[in-house]
Amino acid sequence: MSKKVMLVLLVSILCMTNAFSLPLDLASGSAWGMADAGLSLDYESDSFLANPALLGLEKDKDTSFLASARFQDALDASNFTLSPFAARLEEPVADWAISFISGSLAFSIQNRNTLENRQLFSNASEYVGKRTTLFQFDWATSRSVFSFGVTARASAVSERSLVKIQDDRILLDYFVETTVGRYEAVDDLSSVTFGVGILLDYRWFKMGVVSDQLAYGSAEQSLVVSMDSLLKTLDWGFSFSSPTYDDANQLHLLKFQGALDFVNLGSDTDRELKLGISAKLQLLPTWSVSLQLGYREYKPESTDLLKFSLARGRQTLALNAQLDTFQVTLACGWPTAWYSKTATSQQAVLLVGVALIL
């Protein structure tokens, strides 16, 4: 399949899902199945979204372009009462993004459309719509086994108080309402932030340290440098990766990767542990199939970092296939409270994604 054909296919999917995406999770679009773990893992060419220092590993590579799209929604049997092929939307999230990478420089545009606060009626559903757009610039430099990177982000948020989707034309209404519908800017949610990242790269082992908000500002507040904000958004991660090629430069059939991240270490509300592993079947250098497994858990107390509570956790599973420059992902996630039969408001989520890497 030629690159032109794949590009047309991707654009068609984008138009259908209103998504063209790197997610606003500040992580590689390929890392969702690993619970977005990867502060120090060069899993894919957009891995720098989690840590700008990872661009230091790309400094000798040619210019590349990455575009990806994904759509996710909660899985609930009650949403399939219309028919098996016409399910009501619960809290749909559609992401789109593009990245341009040239050596140790990268520029990205990301967008996310969400529908929240669903209200059900006899023949329709009503939501509150939110759109978030992010512009990101990253730069890195490296020396020996160390890399240092900086990132600048500008985000804008807009909302729509009423999004109505009729049961007899769900896909059409979703596309029109989230694409053509008028959204109002929310100035107090728009912001500019500057962050830093450090990476230690030693053969199969890597360690990364990141802070996403060394400095920040908004439409209502001038830019400030805050040590408190730096500590609240301080992330620390480790990863391992088996070699892609053997000593004879022959492609290994299997490649294993794993990552462990501690995110927002100084925040009692956003502190989180993320853990992920991946097993990749490498058929050719650009043809592979990967199975990913991940776990993430919020940690309200810093003393809970290495303790596991299934009531607060969430597990993810994904299957990724790379076909030359085209990638497709099918993934799902569910609350681990189900294992302990603990009551939870969290639901299972199904995700479908595509990507084009040139």
Image (cartoon, rainbow, N blue to C red):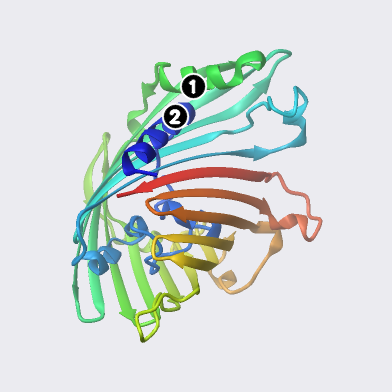
Q: How far, Cα to Cα, is label 2 from label 1?
A: 7 Å
Which class describes the residues within 10 Å of circle 1: few (<14), some (14-19), or many (20+)?
some
In the displayed orientation, state which residue is furthest to the right.
Answer: 341
Write the residue at 35% across / 69% down: 209
The residue that label 1 is drawn on is 175
Which amino acid is tagged 1?
Phe
Secondary structure of the residue carrying numbered label 1: helix
Write the residue at 36% across / 63% down: 231
Q: Nearer the viewer, residue 32 or 357?
A: 357
Q: Nearer the viewer, residue 2 or 22?
A: 2
Which class describes the residues within 10 Å of circle 2: few (<14), some (14-19), or many (20+)?
many
* Residue 19 in picture, x, y percent from top left: 43, 34
* Residue 274 in picture, x, y percent from top left: 53, 64
Which amino acid is tagged 2?
Asn
Query: Is 326 drawn above or below residue 226 in the view shown?
Result: above
Please report contact status of discs 2 and 1: CB closer than 8 Å, yes or no: yes
Query: Is 239 drawn above or below residue 263 in the view shown?
Result: below
Write the residue at 50% across / 44% down: 353
* For residue 182, side relative to residue 175 (left or right): left
